[in-house]
Image (spheres, coloured by chain):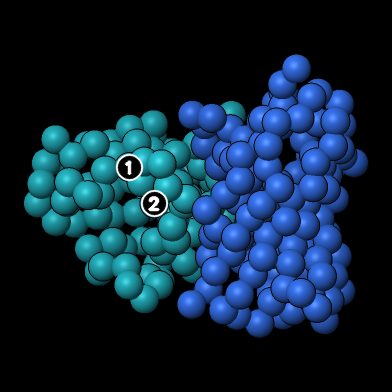
Amino acid sequence: QSVLTQPPSASGTPGQRVTISCSGSSSNIGSNYVYWYQQLPGTAPKLLIYKNNQRPSGVPDRFSGSKSGTSASLAISGLRSEDEGDYYCAAWDDSLSGWVFGGGTKLTVL
Amino acid sequence: EVQLVESGGGLVQPGGSLRLSCAASGFTFSKAWMSWVRQAPGKGLEWVGRIKSKSDGGTTDYAAPVKGRFSISRDDSINTLYLQMNSLNTEDTAVYYCTTDQIYWGQGTLVTVSS
């Protein structure tokens, strides 16, 4: 069981907008920044969003992040076939004194 | 360009030891807090532990499953991060990634614990 809770799967058609949720608690999301990662098949995770809603250079603005209370969301607009992969949220947990991850959401582009 | 290159993975028997290395370049390694994250086959990401920069105390934190068995160290003179893994068991089988505290990631090195 992961400390952060994500839906195991999500899907959408090309051009659609999809959102992936990430639920935590006061000791992690509620008091620290949320990070989002994309892991395409057979590759290492890549940072998509840091500090809740900041995009590293090179990440398209189709990807956006938000946080409210103890939950966060990743939104992907203008869905493309190359977006298929696994998406993870992460945050520092003050109670565990460590980083915690969501279980991952497998995104399928229909 | 930031580069993180892990090495040292391989097959090891249960109860054995292994040391992973991560060669860093493209940023000021001595100032960076560094982490190890692992991913078991077909599973999600799991944080292993981290080491702060020496200027921030150089202290380490570990996830509960590896505490007391794994040790993280760094050699700032050669921009290298280490993960010493002892008393390995089959549940430690995973790809191990080196990260600049969750920002930049290496390509990973596979550790297989099996008899």
**Where is residue B5 drawn, in percent x and y?**
60, 60
How far across and down, in percent of the image, does residue A3 sit? Answer: 59, 39
Q: Is residue A32 visible?
A: no
Q: Is residue A62 left or right of residue B3?
A: left
The disc placed on residue A5 is: none
Q: Is residue A33 above or below residue A88?
A: below
Which secondary structure lies at badge 1? strand
- Crowding at dot 2, Cα within 10 Å, few <14 / some 14-19 / many 20+, comes out as many
For residue B81, above or below residue A90: below
Q: Can you identify the residue that label 1 sits on? A: A85
Query: In the rendered structure, are the residues bearing label 2 and label 1 in contact, judged by CB atoms less than 8 Å apart?
Result: yes
Q: CA distance from mark 2 to mark 1?
A: 7 Å
Q: Is residue B52 visible?
A: yes
Residue B48: give x, y in percent of width and height: 71, 46
Please tell me which of labels 2 and 1 falls first in the chain. 2
Q: Residue at image x 72%, y 56%?
A: B21
> In the shown orientation, is residue B115 left or right of residue A48?
right
Of the chain colours in the picture, the one used for chain B is blue
Q: Quadrant of residue B32?
A: bottom right
The chain identifier of the residue carrying mark 1 reads A
Residue B9 position in % (x across, y down): 68, 42
Instruction: Give the residue type at disc 2.
Output: Gln
Q: Which residue is mark 2?
A: A38
B92 relative to B37, above or below: above
| Mark 1 neighbour class, 10 Å CA radius: few under 14, some 14 to 19, many 20 or more | some
